Image (tube, grey):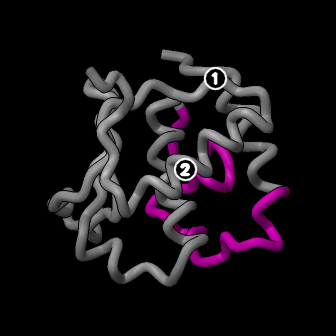
Amino acid sequence: QNMGPNIDPELQIHYNTYLSLCEEYNTEPVHVTTIKFGYLESESGRVRPVGKAYWSRHQIIIDREQWDELNGHFQEEYIILHELGHLAGMRHGDNFIMAGENQYNYVYYESVRWNVLKEYFTQHNQGSIR
């Protein structure tokens, strides 16, 4: 019986990166059951989200069409880290990766990555404040 999370093969590389980063930053990975593609509705006039974290189910749904519009590896990594951050109890505006409405995913790339990951994992370690 496989007790690991159910992750779409196309998204597995980004989850593996997350696990490696958790090890590097001495952080306990968040509990996640599923990371898969689906369709996400827009909420109250906003643009359709690329991803959505369902905290109570420990599940992340990625909108297939929106994902396909992303511009490469680092934008994809940003989205997965952002949604995992929600499962870790972080909220929009808590740090660069948790910016609301994904406004920073276009400026998340290799040269800024290490600076912002330190902040993200520091807050990740603090856990949920619910």
Residue named by callout 2: 81
Task: Say which mark, if any, is on residue 28.
Answer: 1
Tag 2: Cα neighbours inside 10 Å, few (<14), some, or many (≥20)? many
Q: Is residue 44 visible?
A: no
**70 up-or-down from 42: above or below:** below
Q: Position of residue 39 (x, y in %)?
A: 15, 61
Would you identify the image quadrant in which residue 77 lies? Answer: bottom right
Answer whether residue 57 is magenta in the image: no
Residue furthest to the front: 1
Q: CA distance from mark 2 to mark 1?
A: 14 Å
Give the residue type that dot 2 points to: Leu
The residue at 75%/50% (across/down) is: 117
**Numbered circles on residues, count:** 2
In the rendered structure, which amino acid carries the disc numbered 1? Glu
Among the two numbered marks 2 and 1 on one chain, the one whose residue lies closer to the N terminus: 1
Q: Secondary structure at mark 1?
A: loop
The quadrant of the rendering that contains the N terminus is top left
Tell me what residue is drawn at x 51 percent, y 57 percent.
Answer: 13
